[in-house]
Image (cartoon, rainbow, N blue to C red):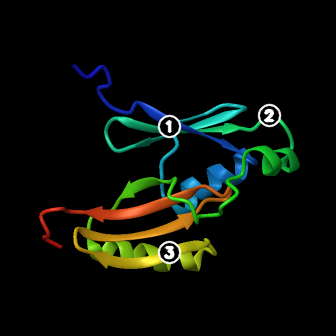
Amino acid sequence: MSFVKGICHFGLSVSDLDESVRFYREVLGLEMSERREQDAFFPIGSDDVLALIQYPWDAVKFDEEMRPKNFGKAFTHFGLTADSVEAVFAFEEHLKANGVKIVKEAYERWDGASLYFLDPNGYTLEYIYFNPGGEK
């Protein structure tokens, strides 16, 4: 018996809430559903929510305690869904035009296409078209 029915939300501590909100809205194109003094919420898909939570201390302490140390070299990440292989490659150009750090450039794989990039806090995100049936 599985007690877990899905993912309700995932939360990220951020160094600068305003900068992070701008990135997730303007660069990734997500719509913000709610903004409060210390957090902001972005629905993703039909059931999931990304919560950005202002780290309670300064940026120096965030860098010491929270910022990922491997800067995209570790496998820890979360994936955002793309509509097609072509969308992955187009999104890479969009990210580059916005000065976003690309960790692993867009590439085709047996089950679709993928690319990895960093958000302003050093979190690794993947943009992926996943189709294990092989249709691209």
Residue type, numbered disc 1: Phe
The local crowd at label 2, few if under 14, some if 14 to 19, many if 20 or more residues have their Cα within 10 Å, is few
Above or below, 125 against 34 in this view is below
Q: Earlier in the sequence, mark 3 or mark 1?
A: 1
What residue lies at 40% left-to-right and 55% top-to-bottom? 80
Residue 44: where, in percent of width, then height? Answer: 40, 44
Viewer-closest of 6 and 21: 6
- Horizontally, is 12 left or right of 6 in the view? right
The local crowd at label 1, few if under 14, some if 14 to 19, many if 20 or more residues have their Cα within 10 Å, is few
Residue type, numbered disc 2: Pro
* Quarter of the image where one finds residue 39: top right
Q: Are marks 2 and 1 in contact (CB under 8 Å)?
A: no
Above or below, 64 against 46 in this view is below
Residue type, numbered disc 3: Lys
Residue position marked by numbered label 2 in the rendering:
56
Residue position marked by numbered label 3 in the rendering:
104
What residue lies at 87% left-to-right and 50% top-to-bottom? 60
Above or below, 35 against 67 in this view is above
What residue lies at 72% left-to-right and 51% top-to-bottom? 67
Separation of marks 2 and 1 at Cα, in angstroms: 18 Å
Residue position marked by numbered label 1 in the rendering:
10
Viewer-closest of 115 and 120: 115
Residue 83: where, in percent of width, then height? Answer: 27, 64
Residue 58: where, in percent of width, then height? Answer: 86, 43
